[in-house]
Image (cartoon, helix red, strand yellow):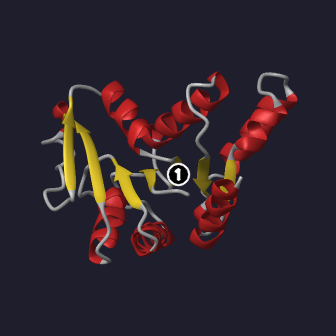
């Protein structure tokens, strides 16, 4: 069973209102399922939307933020728990410890870097937790096409690529994680 999901997403809201709606829907849905939200600890952008939505539903939200970003990312002060760590490396490691799986909503290079590190760790056997892209409004279409190209070029095994969950809605995401939990 999935008890906690790490959510990676933008510290900005992005151009498409569908991104914020998905962040809100995901936060609320996880809280309703008693699934904790583990995320980067900011109240800004999509990060804040996910946290606030889960909190509004009575959910548990754990923020993990490096000391150097507390002021710059405007650490969320209303969380169930806010853990301040020494570095981005410590943040990623701690979020991995706390989470049963990983989800990337739309976001920038930080979001990509974080979900790709967790996905790489599955390839290296560091963990065996599911990784997913929540492909709202086709946000990750180009990235998924690139990964297919990498497979075609023989630089990523097809079996590894197929482990990445790519879904277009919160409902599909929850169904995919339910299916993984039953294995």
Residue at (17, 31) in percent of width and height: 68
Q: Is residue 159 visible?
A: yes
- Establish if 84 lies above or below 171: above
Secondary structure beneath disc 1? strand
The N terminus, quarter of image: bottom right
Q: Identify the residue under disc 1.
A: 103
98 on left or right of 153: left
- Establish if 51 lies above or below 107: below
Of residues 17 and 54, the one nearer the viewer is 54
Of residues 1 and 67, the one nearer the viewer is 1
Residue 120 x/y as whole percent: 60, 28
Of residues 137 and 48, the one nearer the viewer is 48
Residue at (45, 44) in percent of width and height: 108
- Establish if 16 lies above or below 36: below
72 on left or right of 1: left
Q: Count up the numbered dots.
A: 1
């Amino acid at each position: 069973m999935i008890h906690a999901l790490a959510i990676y997403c933008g510290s900005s809201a992005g151009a498409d209102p569908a991104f914020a709606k998905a962040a809100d829907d995901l936060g609320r849905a996880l809280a309703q399922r008693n699934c904790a939200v583990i995320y980067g600890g900011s109240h800004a952008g999509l990060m804040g939307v996910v946290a606030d939505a889960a909190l509004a539903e009575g959910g548990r939200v754990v923020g993990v933020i490096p000391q150097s970003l507390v002021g710059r990312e405007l650490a969320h002060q209303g969380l169930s728990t806010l853990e301040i760590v020494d570095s981005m490396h410590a943040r990623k490691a701690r979020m991995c410890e706390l989470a049963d799986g990983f989800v990337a909503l739309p976001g920038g290079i930080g979001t990509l870097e974080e979900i790709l590190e967790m996905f790489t760790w599955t390839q290296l056997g560091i963990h065996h937790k599911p990784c997913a892209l929540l492909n709202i409004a086709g946000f990750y279409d180009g990235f998924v096409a690139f990964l297919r190209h990498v497979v075609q070029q023989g630089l990523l095994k097809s079996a590894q690529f197929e482990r990445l969950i790519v879904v277009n809605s919160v409902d599909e995401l929850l169904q995919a994680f339910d299916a993984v939990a039953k294995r």
